[in-house]
């Protein structure tokens, strides 16, 4: 497809379970971002990759959150021992340039995670 | 501490009239501002942006105004159409040391309803 895709679109987890959320960025896009959007809030930055390098993970809320992009394309956001406060929509975005100039970030549809 | 604020959770206008969405920011390091539009169950879609060296940017029915001294920006939609009904997010980006601006800070969004 032409856009950013994410899977699954919806995920229900029991408290304490581990989850893995996948992002397929636009082909050839260098930069990949993860954002967390809680209900009634705007998206909040979690982490940033330039190719396979994770250059910024300052937004990850705890060490239960882990992201990777081993081959510089698909990325996975993993949340271990999920808690109810992790319930949110997780958005992935990609852009075509690296850290040379700002340009538009294209967002995927998000994964809605509900932790019971 | 919210660095990007959208103080109006919702706005309702008549078709054909002007819609004005407002956004305030506190971080003087922000130098690039964007508006995103979001429909339910979809990711945010880029609408229009403005660099801090400008005070106005226009794209068709959409115009963004930036008042740096007041740390305020606004999005004008003229004329408003029912298809414009969506949540609008204001976002800002700051240049990071040694690199380029990339990380977005979002407001909470304003739900615009355009009535036929």
Image (spheres, coloured by chain):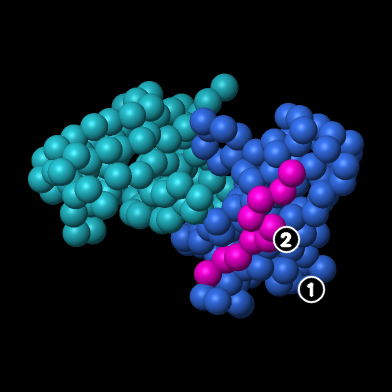
Chain colours: A blue, B cyan
Secondary structure beneath label 1: loop
User: How far across and how far down the image is residue A51, in percent?
Assistant: 71, 69
- The stretch drawn in magenta includes residue A11: yes
- Chain ID of residue with mark 1: A
User: Is B107 or B69 nearer to us in this picture?
Assistant: B107
* Figure disc tally: 2
Q: Range of the magenta residues?
A: A3-12
Labelled disc at residue A22: 2
Most common SS among magenta residues: strand
* Image coordinates for residue B79, horizontal then vertical, percent: 13, 48
Residue B45, image quadrant:
bottom left
What is the spatial separation of the Cα atoms under label 1 and label 2, in whole angstroms? 14 Å
On screen, residue B17 versus residue B69, left or right, reads left
Q: Residues within 10 Å of mark 2 (few under 14, many from 20)?
A: many
- Of all chains, the one bearing label 2 is A
For the residue labelled by badge 2, is the local secondary structure a helix, a strand or a loop?
strand
Compare marks 1 and 2 and give the one earlier in the sequence: 2
In front: A20, or B89? A20
Q: Is residue A99 visible?
A: no
**Vertical comparison of A36 with B100: above or below:** above
**Hey, which quadrant is residue A93 in on the image?**
bottom right
Residue at 30%, 45% in the rendered image: B85
User: Relative to A54, is A95 on the left or the right?
Assistant: left
From the viewer's perspective, is A111 left or right of A101? right
Residue B57 x, y percent position in the rendering: 25, 52
The residue labelled by disc 1 is: A71
């Amino acid at each position: 497809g032409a856009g950013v895709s994410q899977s699954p679109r919806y995920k229900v987890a029991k408290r304490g379970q581990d989850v893995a959320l996948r992002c397929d960025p636009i082909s050839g896009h260098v930069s990949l971002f993860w954002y967390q959007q809680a209900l009634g809030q705007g998206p909040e930055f979690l982490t940033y990759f330039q190719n396979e390098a994770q250059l910024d993970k300052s937004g990850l809320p705890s060490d239960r959150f882990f992201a990777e992009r081993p081959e510089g394309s698909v990325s996975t956001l993993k949340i271990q021992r999920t808690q109810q406060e992790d319930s949110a929509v997780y958005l992935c975005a990609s852009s075509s340039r690296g850290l040379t100039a700002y340009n538009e970030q294209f967002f995927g549809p998000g994964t809605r995670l509900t932790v019971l | 501490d919210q660095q990007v604020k959208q103080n109006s959770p919702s706005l309702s206008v008549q078709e054909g009239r002007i819609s004005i969405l407002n956004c305030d920011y506190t971080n003087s390091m922000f130098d690039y501002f964007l508006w995103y539009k979001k429909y339910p169950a979809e990711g945010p879609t880029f609408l229009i942006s403005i660099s801090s060296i400008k005070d106005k940017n226009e794209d068709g029915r959409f115009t963004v105004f930036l008042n740096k001294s007041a740390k305020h920006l606004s999005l004008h939609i003229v004329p408003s159409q029912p298809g414009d009904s969506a949540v609008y997010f204001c976002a800002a980006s700051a240049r990071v040391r040694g690199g380029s601006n990339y990380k977005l800070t979002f407001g909470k969004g304003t739900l615009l309803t355009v009535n036929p």
